[in-house]
Image (cartoon, rainbow, N blue to C red):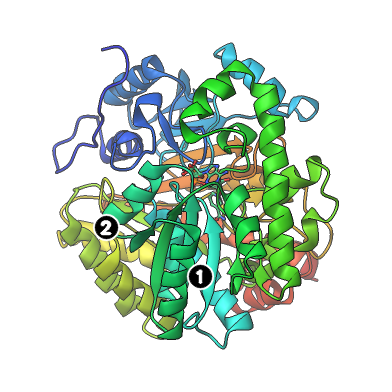
Amino acid sequence: MIGARPVKAYRGTELHTLGWQQEAVLRMLQNNLDPEVAEHPDDLVVYGGSGRAVRNWEAFDAIVRTLATLKNDETMLVQSGKPVGVMRTNAWAPRVLIANSNLVGDWANWDEFRRLEALGLTMYGQMTAGSWIYIGTQGILQGTYETFAAVAAKRFNGTLAGTITLTGGLGGMGGAQPLAVTMNDGVAICVDVDQSSVRRRIEHRYLDVEATSIEHALELAYAARNRKEPLSIGLLGNAAAVFPRMLELGAEIDIVTDQTSAHDPLAYLPLEYGFEEWIPARDADPTGFAEKARRSMRIQVEAMVGFQDAGAEVFDYGNNIRTEAKAAGFENAFAFPGFVPAYIRPLFEQGKGPFRWAALSGDPADIAATDRAILELFPENTSLAKWIRMAGERVHFQGLPARICWLGYGERDKAGLKFNEMVASGELSAPIVIGRDHLDSGSVASPYRETEAMKDGSDAIADWPLLNALVNTSSGATWVSIHHGGGVGIGRSIHAGQVTVADGTELAAQKIARVLSNDPGMGVIRHVDAGYEGAIETAERLHVRVPMRET
Ligand code: NAD
């Protein structure tokens, strides 16, 4: 079969491959392209601007065909979304190894990347798009919930009740913002140029209402804020127009951030164009379009700094908009911090990050059972319990039922082993895949995001994600990936991912025990090495070996 077609992951217990590991790879690849999950499935784009699952439909067919016969001691190699080889390995080796979007340093820029992409030689894999463990907007929801909870703890006495957040972007990731704010009891105004993004978030119950104008949005926001009630408001518009206008109006905004696709100037709509003109204008003159996009980003960032000067809590939410605004000549673009140094790093020090899993059965009852298991395993963690309960009630599954929660070193292996036992005992109707975002504590070098402002200045050291991929490969992960450019764009990050299958076997238990300790363990040692006290305390308490600290 050639060309675009709707894809949906297989459900149930019948295998289409030679084992559950291969089946898990197949179903998660299919799931990434399910129209319920992917933002633009016909173009193989899963999320994050142009983040693709595979290079083209021919490559998709070749991967599916290869997985069908891949043996339990073989490994398929994928180079930027195209399967390029099958090697004989062993039962502990990953079934798939993936390298996406990597370029040699001096060549690592968007222009060269796009030249090579046009030649059909590479693709942009984002983080979990090309590594087949994207689970829809929920994937980012918990991290976003954690971030807004940390904002509340830092500035607003632990709750966003009575505050208004202004943000841009209601796409695959950005669409989590309205629900994360309302879960923290706040009011959010979310601006997006794409009517379908606004509509989609309302359909999925991530967004409550749509306003018809800036004034209408503010009216709704003030009323909810005054009643201290949570409310999320979508507003169709260009963030580069709405943000400065709101500043001019003296809008009472407490928190400002943004998750438009600013990491890729071709995925940010400049002020000069209407939504319908986007694609033709971009295709006619990509360089000119990117310049205009940067100029618009500058206008948006200037307004964000203006809100900060007026007393708001302002942060960059990982889309690199400050760099692009600076490239457009705004010297003060870095006046506000990135969200990782501002709120997330203390969690990274403990190896905490976005642990996620999906039920290969397709049965939501399996996720409900794993939710109960998490509540039983970590009874002392009240914010985790709050999240799991709210997620159970409010999260609409996209594609295969899945769950995410942030767990740290010493916790992830416990959860993974429990899930494996539940598969073995028949409590779950099919195996579970356990993975994570590449945005994790020890798996990414990204100086504008995860490793911004490291204590020892090691922001751009990219040995850590490579070691992370190597150790996961050596520990028994089912698939492992090394990507470049996710989140913040080409030239700006290197990161690794892993996914491990809990199929209920003893071998899976041994692999899970290693991978789910060593993977977060990388986060602990990375932060010990950079001199973070929280990491040193975690390593000592949980006996993570760090040779330079041993005598
Ligand atoms: P996406 O492409 O799915 O959505 C981006 C949205 O921005 C689209 O709906 C688009 O219409 C809108 N948009 C573009 N230009 C706009 C403008 N000028 N004004 C208003 N809206 C505009 O992308 P996504 O997956 O939601 O990711 C958004 C950004 O967040 C990316 O840069 C991504 O790298 C970053 N990101 C951050 C994190 C994090 O943890 N902070 C995680 C993942 C992604």
Q: The residue tagged with tag 2: helix, strand or loop?
A: loop
Relative placement, left or right, of 478 versus 316 is: left
Tag 1 residue: 146
Amino acid, disc 2: His
Given contact means CB atoms under 8 Å apart, are the residues at marks 2 and 1 in contact? no
User: What residue lies at 73% left-to-right and 29% top-to-bottom?
Assistant: 108
| Residue at the far bottom in the pictured view | 157
Q: The residue tagged with tag 1: helix, strand or loop?
A: helix
Crowd class of label 1 (few under 14; some 14 to 19; many from 20; radius 10 Å):
many
Q: Is residue 200 visible?
A: yes
Q: Which sits in the foreground, 515 or 204?
A: 204
User: What residue lies at 38% left-to-right and 30% top-to-bottom?
Assistant: 73
Crowd class of label 2 (few under 14; some 14 to 19; many from 20; radius 10 Å):
some
* The label number, if any, that marks residue 347 in the structure image: none
Task: State the count of labels.
Answer: 2
User: What residue lies at 59% left-to-right and 61% top-to-bottom?
Assistant: 521
Q: Is residue 132 above or below residue 116?
A: below
Which of the two labelled residues, at mark 2 and mark 1, occupies the earlier sequence position?
Answer: 1
Picture quadrant of residue 208: bottom left
Relative image position of residue 325 (x, y in whole percent)? 75, 46
Label 2, label 1: how far apart the Cα atoms are: 19 Å
Relative image position of residue 261 (x, y in whole percent)? 56, 43
Tag 2 residue: 396
User: What residue lies at 33% left-to-right and 49% top-to-bottom?
Assistant: 199
Relative image position of residue 130 (x, y in whole percent)? 47, 34
